[in-house]
Amino acid sequence: MAGVKALISLAFTGSIGMTLVILACALPQYGNYWPLIMTLFYFFSPLPTLMARKYQDDIGSSNTCKEVALFITSGIVISAFALPIVLSRSPVGDPIIQTGACVLTVFGNIVTFLTILGFFILFESDDEGYNMWG
């Protein structure tokens, strides 16, 4: 069972990551709320892995469902990092988000996705027979 201190630290780091993304939106010099779209990526990134836990089989050494779920998850995570960079590098006219908002969003992504990874690592030992990494 996961410890209370570990859960509190995961909640704290998750709130720091979300604070960075909200600061990228709410600071007056940036002035738009496009970086808040990252919350969709935070919601959708663990879903493929959580669904793959239900369809695991112990027959072979390779689990296709788990590998596809990790591939989809990595695509979601890469998209979450790429979207603010693309929005800040708009070639036509003014960029959609400022460079400072892009930096805050990328740092918020790093902290939040490390928190999600920490959650999976922390609760991996609670599930018998499931190992996400091997």
Image (cartoon, grey):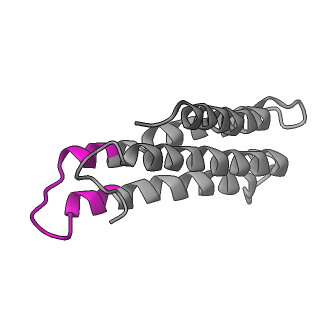
Q: Residue furthest left?
A: 59
- Does residue 21 appear to the left or right of 42 in the view shown? right
Q: Residue furthest bottom?
A: 61
Of 13 and 77, nearer the camera is: 13
Residue 91: % across, % down:
74, 60
- Please identify the quarter of the rendering in which residue 67 is found: bottom left
Q: Is residue 61 magenta?
A: yes
Of 4 and 87, nearer the camera is: 4
In which quadrant is the C terminus drawn?
bottom left
In which quadrant is the N terminus drawn?
top left
- Please identify the quarter of the rendering in which residue 25 is found: top right
Question: What span is colored magenta in the figure?
Answer: 50-69
Residue in the image at 44% along x and 47% along y: 120
* On screen, residue 51 above or below 89: above
Residue in the image at 74% along x and 58% along y: 89
Residue 116: % across, % down:
52, 44
- Does residue 20 appear to the left or right of 40 in the view shown? right
Of 60 and 106, nearer the camera is: 60
